[in-house]
Amino acid sequence: SYELTQPPSVSVSPGQTASITCSGDKLGDKYACWYQQKPGQSPVLVIYQNHKRPSGIPERFSGSNSGNTATLTISGTQAMDEAAYYCQAWDSNTGVFGGGTKLTVL
Amino acid sequence: EVQLVQSGAEVKKPGESLRISCEGSGYTFTIYWITWVRQMPGKGLEWMGRIDPIDSYTNYSPSFQGHVTISADKSISTAYLQWSSLKASDTAIYYCARISGSSLDYYMDVWGKGTTVTVSS
């Protein structure tokens, strides 16, 4: 079965740029999306179609996808961005999530 | 407002059956697939399966095939997730989500608040 691999944790200082990677076999041939989940809350879509932002998502969130790696980039990271982030893609009509990355802003 | 309203928390014993629900409102329910996602305590998101409400066509993750059943009643804009015999390992939060996009580009743009299922003897 298809697998997506994320680092368990990433740390960033406020105002700096955070990058969270998601690796999968030929992931660049698929569309990747990203979800943010804060403790006790439902996930929220932050990036779809590799790089598009839903309405209401700040411009500091951006995405890319090439080769075997999709990347979520948060520019000018704020304390409110501290959360778990999950990448997700589809393979043979089956949804697949990465294991999630805990972003710590310190 | 587009929203998915999920049924309330459940506490069950092993071996019991259960059906939880997800009601869509603020949009045309039959246009969008509904998916179910599991989150075990302290763990990540797991995709379980999805349903097309217009004809109830479903497909499941291999990890959940045969263990749960996804169904829908389009007349009341509601999708369901059910178990015939619960296990302690089914203890989790279950989210429903709306799937938007097209065949290669699906994404989950609206999420319910989750239903907590606790299975304990």
Image: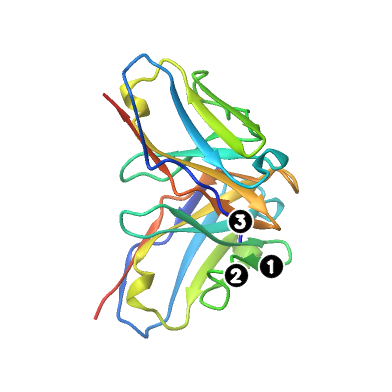
Mark 1 vs 2, N-terminal side: 1
Q: CA distance from mark 3 to mark 2?
A: 25 Å
In the rendered structure, which amino acid carries the disc numbered 2? Answer: Ser
Q: Residue at x 35, y 72 (%)?
A: B89
Chain ID of residue with mark 2: B
Q: Position of residue B27 (x, y in %)?
A: 63, 45
Q: Residue at x 37, y 83 (%)?
A: B16
In the rendered structure, which amino acid carries the disc numbered 1? Answer: Ser
Quarter of the rendering occupied by the C terminus of chain B: bottom left
| Disc number for residue B56 | 1
Q: Are marks 1 and 3 on the same chain?
A: no
| Residue B1 in view | no
Quarter of the image for residue B78 reads bottom right
**In the image, B92: left or right of A30?**
left
In the rendered structure, which amino acid carries the disc numbered 3? Answer: Tyr
In contact (CB < 8 Å): disc 3 and disc 2? no
Q: Position of residue B6 (x, y in %)?
A: 44, 57
Q: Nearer the viewer, mark 3 or mark 2?
A: 3
Q: Nearer the viewer, mark 1 or mark 3?
A: 3
Q: Please, what secondary structure does the residue beneath circle 3 have?
A: loop
In contact (CB < 8 Å): disc 1 and disc 3? no
**In the image, B6: left or right of A34?**
left
Q: Residue at x 72, y 41 (%)?
A: A29
Q: Residue furthest left?
A: B121
| Residue B48 in view | yes
Q: Label 3: which residue?
A: A2
Q: Label 2: which residue?
A: B71
Q: Position of residue A4 (x, y in %)?
A: 54, 48
